[in-house]
């Protein structure tokens, strides 16, 4: 066996030991923390990537709060039920690209007192 063939055989043998590249997988879910206080909602970020998302509501206030989320232009409402002060509720969902979502506390009078926010999805976010 020539030196060139020996080197080629060694490279092929080494390549066989390297595991094949893992198939492309879905990106991890976007994460959003919504903090509720009397009487406001604060988002940890104003935009998230579309697709799978985890939304958490942390109640930093003194009263129970909930969180409803609806894509503007849709009638479908998803939400996190009542969350007691100092506790956190979680919602897993899929967000559509290039959309805006309205978030609000549905406890009577809370939205009218300022517990509303808007979330946007952007087709491409850095690092995703």
Image (cartoon, rainbow, N blue to C red):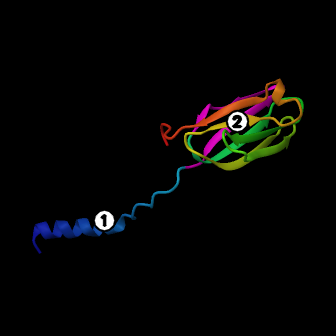
Q: Where is residue 87 in the image (x, y as percent from the top left)?
A: 82, 39
How many badges with numbers are in the image? Answer: 2
* Image quarter of residue 69: top right
Label 2 element class: strand
Q: Position of residue 75 (x, y in %)?
A: 72, 45
Label 1 element class: helix
Q: Is residue 93 left or right of residue 23?
A: right
Task: Say if 10 sits above or below 52 in the image.
Answer: below
First to last magenta residue range: 28-48
* Image quarter of residue 64: top right
Other residues around mark 2 within 10 Å, as few (<14) / some (14–19) / many (≥20):
some
Identified at 72% across, 28% down, the residue is 42
Q: From this viewpoint, which residue is outermost toward the bottom?
A: 1
Image mark for residue 15: 1
The residue pinned by badge 2 equals: 102
Identified at 55% across, 39% down, the residue is 98
Q: Nearer the viewer, residue 61 or 72?
A: 72
Image mark for residue 23: none
Q: Where is residue 89 in the image (x, y as percent from the top left)?
A: 78, 44
Q: Please state which of the two labelled residues, at mark 2 or mark 1, is closer to the viewer.
A: 2
Other residues around mark 1 within 10 Å, as few (<14) / some (14–19) / many (≥20):
few
Check the picture and name the quadrant holding the N terminus: bottom left
Q: From this viewpoint, which residue is outermost toward the left?
A: 2
Q: Is residue 84 left or right of residue 123?
A: right
- Predominant SS along the magenta part: strand
Residue 31 belongs to magenta span: yes
Q: Which of marks 2 and 1 is nearer the N terminus?
A: 1
Marks 2 and 1 sit apart, C-alpha to C-alpha, by 52 Å
């Amino acid at each position: 066996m020539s030196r060139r063939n020996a080197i080629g055989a060694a490279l092929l043998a080494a390549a066989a030991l390297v595991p094949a590249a893992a198939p492309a997988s879905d990106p991890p879910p976007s994460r959003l923390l919504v903090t509720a206080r009397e009487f406001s909602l604060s988002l940890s970020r104003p935009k998230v990537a579309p697709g799978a998302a985890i939304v958490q509501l942390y109640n930093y206030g003194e009263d129970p709060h909930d969180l409803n989320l609806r894509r503007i232009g849709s009638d479908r409402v998803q939400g996190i039920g009542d969350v007691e002060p100092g506790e956190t509720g979680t919602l897993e969902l899929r967000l559509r690209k290039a959309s805006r979502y309205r978030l609000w506390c549905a406890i009577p009078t809370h939205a009218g007192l300022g517990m509303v926010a808007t979330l946007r999805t952007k087709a491409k976010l850095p690092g995703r």
